[in-house]
Image (spheres, grey):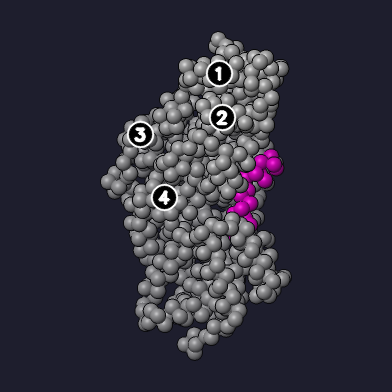
Amino acid sequence: MSGGLTLTSEMMLVLGLVLFTMVMFTVEWIRSDVLALLVLVALGVSGVVPGDQLFVGFAGDAVIAIMAMMILGAGLDRTGVLGGAAAFMLKLSNGDERRLILILCGITGLVSAVVQNPAVAALFLPVVSRISTRTGVPISRLLLPMASCIILGGTMTMVGNSPQILLNDLLVAVNRNLPSGASTMDPVGMFGVSPIGLSLLLMGLGFFYWFWPKLQPPSDDEGAAVNPGTTEVYFEQMYGIEGEMIEMRVLADSPLIGTSIGDLEKTPGTPLILAIKSGDESRLAPPADLIIAKDTILGVLGQTGEVQHWANARLLRCLKGTPHFAAMFNPANAGVSEAVVTPSSRFIGHTVGELRLRKRFGVSMLALGRGGTIYRDDIRGKSVRAGDILVLHGAWRDLSHAAEDRDFVVVTDYPKNEERPHRIRHALVFFALSMTMALLSNLPLPVALLAGAVGMLLTGVLNMDEAYRAINWKTIFLMASLIPLGSAMDATGAAAWVAQEMMLAMGNVPPWALQIAVAVLTTLFAQVMSNVGATIVMVPMSVNIALAANGDPIVFALVATLSASNNFTSAANPVLSLVTGPAGYTGRDLMRSGLPLSAAYIVIAVVMVNLTF
């Protein structure tokens, strides 16, 4: 590299695509998965990546392994493996808040070593809600430590997070382009990074045990948890959703006859319409296009006096009690719940009206929470964003079915009819089998993980439709489409050129200083693009920096891979985005704990990688 590489047109094209990708990830003008496909097509049309190598990411070991892990995680969720976690953690904590945080963070950190990080966060959100309800500890004191330790725990194995699953595939591609005489890099074993990840997790546990009480955001109990027994008080305090259920009959001369539910709801002062009976058919969450007819029974929620005045003005007769909807509104069958929109949700970018939640899923949306602001009026025109809180009403059965597509995570602890606790032994056996084969056999990692997933399918832990729904296809397309960009960085010499320029700028510095520079640069990349994108761009670059500095390429590659997960300050991290809404965290809250965590993370990662490898 001392001879000097010249910047070629191919290098400029690849670097331009990297810059374009970073900018688009930041401004979010294009969906991330669509952006990744656009980059893939650009690489193919320009000829930078040959056609026979353009789609290798879709059949890569990393992509298959992530799909298998998603299915395994769904199997554990479906059988209720985590159902007793709340009681177990409460018993161990013995009522002490700091001990509770330590136990919660330790358990979730360990689970995240073998289950994808966002899945762990989604699985434990209702558990933490239940713990908060039972102990009175505001949920805002629990969720951020839990989320941070989930991220830290994911570094303990090569299947805990996407960057580490990707690493071995990237090393294969980098090995093909190594200069003559350079030794190829061996793949990292399943638990090869465990000492590093364990050190990072212990650092996080110590940080939150000793320093979190001084750093945690102030709370006025706004983060109180939700369960069916406390929904009325909670939703009245949080969202102003109050009153009682009132039934009313549409009289023959009512001006509402012929009006649709959607048009009626646009009228100012209209109470929340949660149920309707037309003829012999009763249903919750009436769709917006349903037409009101004579003798239709409406079930509305509101203050008695206000509802009575509204009904009289429209020639509706309020009924005594709830003779038609009492069973439907029984708390054991239906209620109000909170759900958080996931970063991969198909809801993002659509308005509430376009989602057609009542027609598709049978649930009504009562309010929308975003950044501490509650929207209740004219929410049909609001566009949905990642991290938004949806306040829903419907039958628990319908809510459970709607949540299966994983467009949102239900935070409320509600009765779930679809769990299969009688299959819990099968789920645990096949999960343990897949982990054992990954560790002790010579089978490729995707084969070992798929063996466990197929075992769960054959024994009825999941059916095939549920397995399809468990796979986050946005993540799959994002990863598979960006893998060729990393290969192009290496194959065109763009990574080597950037490494050369970086070496010239930094001068003659020791390898550990270069490793810290790689860690900081990757960390910054991870703030503005996905951890997958940061890994794909930085691993080839870090290997070239190592070769230029006569350092160990695998050490530099690992520093970059681990640093791609070093994002504790931005809701762009899918784990943080899941907890920010329910706990009401602000950017300042994330920075307050995230900056010292990120600094300590870099130091420990660099030191431990060098000691371990």
Q: Position of residue 126 (x, y in %)?
A: 48, 36
Query: Which residue bears the numbered disc 4?
Result: 148
Q: Position of residue 362 (x, y in %)?
A: 63, 31
Query: Which residue bears the numbered disc 1?
Result: 313
* Residue 133 part of the magenta segment: no
**Of the residues under marks 3 and 4, which one precedes in the sequence?**
4
* Residue 478 part of the magenta segment: yes
Residue at the location (64% across, 21% down)? Answer: 255
> What amino acid type should be assigned to the residue bearing mark 3?
Asp
Residue at the location (65% across, 70% down)? Answer: 43
> What amino acid type should be assigned to the residue bearing mark 1?
Ala
Q: CA distance from mark 2 to mark 1?
A: 13 Å
> What amino acid type should be assigned to the residue bearing mark 2?
Thr
Query: Which residue bears the numbered disc 2?
Result: 267
Bin the neighbour count of mark 2 within 10 Å (Cα to Cα): few under 14, some 14-19, many 20 and up.
few
> 106 or 217: which is nearer to us?
217
Mark 3–mark 2 CB contact (< 8 Å) = no
Q: Secondary structure at mark 1?
A: helix
Query: Which residue bears the numbered disc 3?
Result: 221
